Image (cartoon, grey):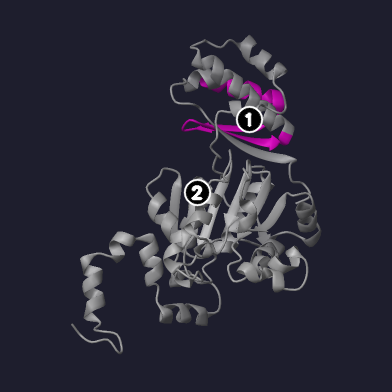
Amino acid sequence: MDGVGLLLERTLKIPPGVDRTTVLGSADRNLKMIREALGVSISAQNGRIVLRGEEGAVNKAAAVFEHLARLAQSRQTLSREQVLEAIVSAPETPRVDETLVGDDLPAWEGLINVYASGRPVRPKTPNQDLYLEAIRTSDLVFGIGPAGTGKTYLAVAAAVHMLKIGRVKRLVLARPAVEAGERLGFLPGDLQQKVNPYLRPLFDALGDMLDYQSLQRFIANDVVEIIPLAFMRGRTLNDAAIILDEAQNATISQMMMFLTRTGRRSKCIVNGDPSQVDLDDPSQSGLIDAVRRLHRIKGVETAALGPEDIVRHRLVQQIVEAYGSQAVEEAVHPARARSPRAVRSSEAQGPKEGQAAP
């Protein structure tokens, strides 16, 4: 991780209505000129331009393409001299508001480059693969599933990968401290010591993927921030990977507050288990409410993980199955869970113990 920021990959999107050939040149002439002049790897396909190389050269190439796209929007025919002038005059730090991708955080290419205990972090089940793909391609992802399905671990791995390749500049990881509530003041130590027990799983995941010295340096420099959910109020987080863990214990108002912290070029990942709500009123779970409200919005994806995705001890899967996963089904597929068929299935099981039959 000491090399973070030296190598960079950026994906630019040619705006709708802009002629691709004008930007790239006939037979990709402009692309080849930029590649040779700046020494960056460039590939173009389906309206996207992927740049790879040293950070300064990649940013300079991005600025060149931004300039060419603006000229193309004005229906200009670009000469070889104009392209050369753009290469010479382009800054190494282009203005972000003028990038071709606008406010969208482009998807990375290939597998995540993160290791734990010397082995690459990879999804182990089809649903985990779909979950990681949702994180790769969507701006807001809800990961719903029982304990042990890798929701937090894969989210942190994806965030570390985005930091390594320059997709984001910082990581912000938050959890509600529901069990503490007003009782935090009675716990020994300062505020950080009081909330540390609730944030420990996030530290553990990061500790698996970053060496101790790098993690401490990132925390000291605010590149990595691990905080209670309440500390998110009033902030706007740009160029960040933002993770909310144990989101079933966030209230509806807290969830709205958290989701509206997302700034430009940021990715938000919200994880939780609807079957483990610790709020006094479980119906106020912000996770369940948010999935129901937002699932039809473009750029929002919900990944459902089940008992078959549990990668902990075999007993964990059997324990989860014993307690049932109806809460997860209701959160992810509320219409299906409340369908007449589901109601008939529930009624067919007969009355609960101590309850009279109708």
Which labelled disc corresponds to residue 183? none
Q: Which residue is mark 2?
A: 140
* Residue at 77% over, 66% down: 190
Which residue is located at x 63 percent, y 15 percent?
Answer: 83
The segment highlighted magenta reads 27-55
Q: Earlier in the sequence, mark 1 or mark 2?
A: 1
Q: Secondary structure at mark 1?
A: helix
Specify the amino acid type for callout 1. Answer: Val
Locate residue 66, reporting x and y percent: 59, 23
Q: Nearer the viewer, residue 124 or 149?
A: 149
Q: How many marks?
A: 2
Q: Nearer the viewer, residue 170 or 186?
A: 186
Query: Up-down: is 263 above or below 127?
Result: above
Amino acid type for the residue under numbered disc 2: Leu
Q: Are marks 1 and 2 in contact (CB under 8 Å)?
A: no
Image point (50%, 64%), residue name:
248
Residue 1 on image: x %, y %: 75, 51
Q: Which residue is mark 1?
A: 96
In which quadrant will I find the C terminus? bottom left
Query: Is there any visible trace of residue 112 in the rendered image?
Result: no
Residue at the farthest left position: 358
Cα gap from disc 1 to disc 2, whole angstroms: 21 Å
User: Residue sitting at 34 percent across and 60 percent down?
Assistant: 333
Please provide percent x and percent y for residue 305.
45, 65
